[in-house]
Image (tube, grey):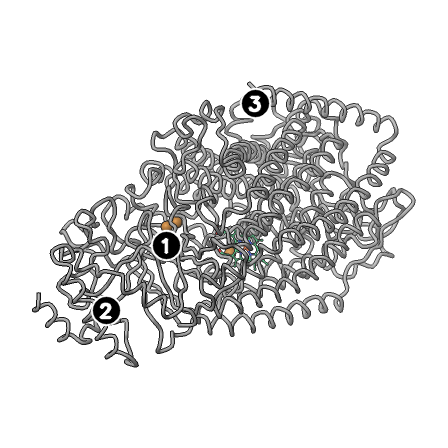
Amino acid sequence: MATENPQVVTETEEHVHEESHYHPKLSFIRKYVFSMDHKTIAKQFLITGIFWGVIGGLMSMVFRLKLGFPDDSFPFLQSILGSWAPEGDLKPEFYNALITIHGTVLVFFVLTAGLSGTFANLLIPLQVGARDMASPFLNMMSYWFFFLASVVMFSSLFLPQGPASPGWTVYPPQSALPQASPGSGAGMTYWLVSMALFIFSALLGGLNYIVTILNMRTKGMSMARLPLTIWAFLVTAILGVLSFPVLLSASVLLIFDRGMGTSFFLSDIYIAGEALRTSTGEILSGGSPILFQHLFWFLGHPEVYIIILPAMGIVSEVLAVNARKPIFGYRAMVGSLLAIGFLSFVVWAHHMFVTGMNPFIGSVFMLLTLIIAVPSAIKVFNWVTTLWKGNIRLTPAMLFSIGFVSTFIAGGLTGLFLGNPAIDIQLHDTYFIVAHFHIVMALSAIFGMFAGIYHWFPKMFGRMMNKNLGYLHFFLTIVCAYGVFWPMHYIGMAGVPRRYFEFSNFQAFGGFADLNQFITVAAIIGFTAQFLFIINFFYSIFHGRKATMNPWKSVTIEWTTPIKTGHGNWPGEIPEVHRWAYDYSKNGDSENDFIPQTTPVSADEIEPEH
Amino acid sequence: MLSFLAVICVVFLLIVIVQISKILESLGVLKGEEEAQESSNKLNGGLLFVFIILSFYLIYWSIKKYSPEFLPESASIHGVWIDQLFNITLLITGVVFILTEFLLFYFAWKYRGNRKKKALHYVDNHRLELLWTVIPAITLTVLVGFGAVRWYEITSQPPDNVTWIEITGRQFEWMPRYPGVDGVFGKRMVEYIDDGTGNKLGIDTTDINSEDDFLPTEIHLVVNQPVAFKIRSRDVLHSFYLPHFRVKMDAVPGIPTQFWFTPTKTSAQMAKDVGKPDFVYELACAELCGASHSNMRLEVFVDTQEEYDEWEKQQTSWYSSFMGLDKEDDADAEQLEEAADQKEDNDEGEEIEITETNGNVEENNVISMLQND
Ligand code: HEM
Ligand SMILES: [Cu+2]
Ligand SMILES: [Cu+2]
Ligand SMILES: [Cu+2]
């Protein structure tokens, strides 16, 4: 390896030599904490993401207990939550705080940082054939900004008034006025600071991903030869770079409104016994809370695609490898990624159909929203066709990928109801929405993440995860997850609003005690089942079976690196790429049914398109 | 204690599962990796297929059980349209769902891996892809078309004979206001809001139009009579949500919104239709507005014209109670009402506008009433 052949490393890339893993001089801190190695940074994102996943999941357990068993009290809650749950009865303010933080950390910390932070970092240099990211330093900063954001968000949990509580969408005026709810005081300030830090992290990461993909591909790796993972990360990063700044601007304006007497989002408000006035004593007016919603969703909608696209990329890859077939319709897959990416910028106001918007504008957004379903449908059909006549290895990663496609179908189809503003009048802000976006995020995107972890674990840690635990994990998860979110469609169709602390006040909403109880039980079992994964994950890091170099017989070039991949990735020269990333079952027998990207095209071989 | 025991049990269970999996894994390695994978392909493929078939059955069963609750009986004209659109979309998506999910899981099982087989190297098929681009596109065009037509109808300007009601949200209460017999609301200003004195809406008491506005604690509508709500908020966002009428519109401080519709079933009729004698229409808040978001309830009644008139008669104007007029002299209140009745007759057929600036309807009439006091 490199130590045997340091000459080559020095020759190809000077800086790699200095930082190389193969040099034992690197201190523990530089190697594992303030590391600039994209693979270590990926693991840091992943483990922080898992941490937040557990925290966010625990929060959902607490509020599901309340929703499923509204009349019982759970004294043990008091020991965890203290004054939030006196005598074990959750207080409504803290119910709101829990759903807010649950949503925020799962959307941003788990499914953005934990998903694209992990896999973009791990896979971009390895799959395009680069020694590291374009800027390893900024990449490291990206993680540490995320870490700081996490620290701030986590400390907000211990504020005496509790963390932010206006929902993950933090609509003003509630989020602007400390008088409006306890969480709108210090809790909201922490939330905004945390998000600002997070946005820096996302931008540093995103710029790095884009530059690396565009500029640092190895010889022969044309754009048309990139695996779909990389295409997905590229589009994701572009979306992030273009849309996160808008959330930052919204946050800054909100900070002004909160602390400096401006009224970007405030108008004609009387709260806590007095009217809000400017410093000169006039009634504060002229602002628009709707403006905030536009700014928020201009990020917010691309954000949901920032979450799902990496999962789509991962799944495309895992499906092809394990079906032992090329991904069906590579060009259409790339085209639909680009189309989805573009369209995701022009549909944001479908979250605002009932804010009193001009009906004409509503219909334009309906049209654009439903158009997104076309590229989504193409992807689904192509995935299903990829399975057709395959020779499918049902590994845990493959199971989760199939689960991804299944849930994405379910969640995408409910989008067609919501994108239709007339129907959305009834469904908006009901449990139908909750079902829709949990099926695409809490199921699809998380399944994509699991698929990625099971698949690339050997690359990350040089060991294998236990498959049997993986199988059990998958089946328990998919059964419980559908068990939780499928019935929510029913509750939503019956008109029950979301974010309700209790349903019994209303005749119209109180009739679903049995379903709510069922959901809670399924959620608890499903959450517990995740510990199978967590145990498997951490146990296998240290004691898993040793991996072979290319355990899944994959053609992509990350598997040409040594099992214990050092900083710099390839001890020798970076391999040259000669073909696209999907030559499965092209020739050979079932033992040898793949041609790595590094294999030159032989004379008698026809390489049609790529 | 019980929960502690439960946690212990779960932990124990997890440990057992982990140990068994480890043993199975080592057995698999002994057997040979390929062979182990092949047998798990068989098992997992079978389970996937069983999963989807069972799921289809459970979906069928649960829909049969719960569908009476879906889309609660709609009680407005446009509510029926929305339900139609919903059902068309459900039909289309349902077919797509069953087809694609079935194929997905069926393929996973049918083509489960086997060392003796080889996959088909199948890269592309433009005709197939074109097909499944065009079909969704056409289907969606149809959905967009129907949707747009209904959306424009629902959001159109209210008809001339509409009755206006104003509804204001605050933490945590809905506050309706009726314009009274003149059909015109008195002016409102944030400056005038004062919870201490009871001017919760900031009504301008010097505006003559405010004299007969009344602020009931429940909403009454007339069946088959179009009604328009002017929706406002005093503090944070709320959302005006009438599930049975398929009405939802955000209440935004500083930016009034509106929604008009025609209720088609009286409360009594609805109670009979749904078979619940104690049925009552409800107004809820659908936008997270704080701790008591789930408790912003107001009852709504759809009356026949006669019932409504009867109810309206019993309402005292907010002005008179705010100024203490109703307590001073009962006769005054009656007088006010009589005058009001008269005025109503005069108003019949007259077009009434909602705009706050339109303040001159029957001005003299009210002034003379005031002078009487
Ligand atoms: C065919 C594709 C899709 C369509 C047509 C669609 C449409 C919609 C619409 C119209 C809404 C707004 C509903 C309302 O608030 O009344 C919505 C909400 C939402 N969607 Fe989708 N969607 C699609 C796919 C996705 C995907 C792939 C994701 C994420 C991975 C996603 C995540 C969300 C989220 C998070 C919300 C709700 C946010 C909130 O209000 O808290 N959607 N969707
Ligand atoms: Cu959206
Ligand atoms: Cu409210
Ligand atoms: Cu509310």
Disc 1 marks a residue whose amino acid type is Phe
Above or below, B113 relative to A492? above
| Alpha-carbon span between mark 1 and mark 2 | 27 Å
Asked if residue A597 shows in the view, the reply is no
Residue at 71% across, 66% down: B132
Q: Residue at 78% across / 61% down in the picture?
A: A608
Chain letter for mark 1:
A
Which is more toward the observer, A110 or B274?
B274
Q: Residue at x 50, y 51 (%)?
A: A496
Separation of marks 1 and 3 at Cα, in angstroms: 44 Å
Residue B3 numbered mark, or none = 3
Residue labelled with disc 2: B356
Q: Are marks 1 and 2 on the same chain?
A: no
| Pointer 2 local density, CA inside 10 Å: few below 14, some 14–19, many at least 20 | few
Label ID, residue A499: none
Q: State which chain disc 3 sits on.
A: B
* Residue denoted by label 1: A292
User: Nearest the camera: A12 or A69?
Assistant: A69
- A561 vs A441, left or right, is right
Q: Residues within 10 Å of mark 3 (few under 14, many from 20)?
A: few
Element carrying mark 3: helix
Amino acid beneath label 2: Glu
Name, please, the residue furthest toward the right: B116
Residue A316: x and y in percent read: 69, 50
Answer above or below: position of A432 versus B220.
above
Circle nearer the viewer, 1 or 2: 2
